[in-house]
Amino acid sequence: MKSITINGIPISQSYKSALPYNPKLKERAKNLRYSSNLPEVLFWTRVSKGKFYGLDFDRQRIIGNYIVDFYVRQLSLVIEIDGASHDFDGDYDERRETYLISLGLKVYRIRVVDVLKNMDFVSIGLEHFIVENYGVNL
């Protein structure tokens, strides 16, 4: 695996292999990937093809019985965009997040309004989260 640094800080990679996968969700995940959800498309444009520190982002990734907005395999990091159709929905979202964390994944939430109004703020917030949670102290 290629080494990653953010703002001069080495990032420890945390790849989880063999995550649970429900094949019954494959078609739904595919449909979600091709839907025109503006916040997700804007975020995807910013991070796809290694544009964000060379990290590989998956969009609409199936993990267990859930489909997450984005997944960074090198970090075992789930990224969710919350707001509008993605409102944090009480019990369901708590169970979902608890499940993802139980698999050893970290979950980072981004507000839709931030994606729509200030993508630089979103990028900086994600940088800080990754450095704080995966940065290697030299």
Image (cartoon, rainbow, N blue to C red):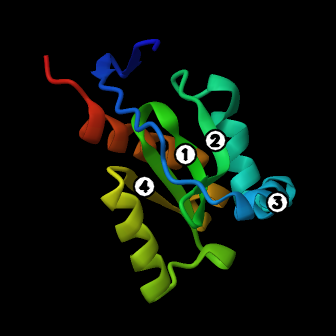
- Mark 3: few, some, or many residues within 10 Å (few <14, many ≥20)? few
* Residue at which label 2 appears: 58
Pick the residue in front: 118 or 75. Answer: 75
**Side (left or right) of 5 relative to 67:** left
- Mark 2: few, some, or many residues within 10 Å (few <14, many ≥20)? some
- In the picture, the disc for residue 108 is 4
Looking at the rendered structure, the kind of residue marked 4 is Tyr
CB-based contact (under 8 Å), mark 4 and mark 1? no
Residue 52, image quadrant:
top right
- In the picture, the disc for residue 92 is none
**Side (left or right) of 89 relative to 39:** left
> Which quadrant: the N terminus?
top left
Looking at the rendered structure, the kind of residue marked 2 is Asp
Which is more foreground, mark 2 or mark 4? 2
Q: How far separated are the C-alphas under marks 2 and 4? A: 14 Å
* Residue at which label 1 appears: 71
Which is more foreground, mark 3 or mark 1? 3
Q: How far separated are the C-alphas under marks 2 and 3? A: 16 Å
CB-based contact (under 8 Å), mark 3 and mark 4? no
> Which quadrant: the C terminus?
top left
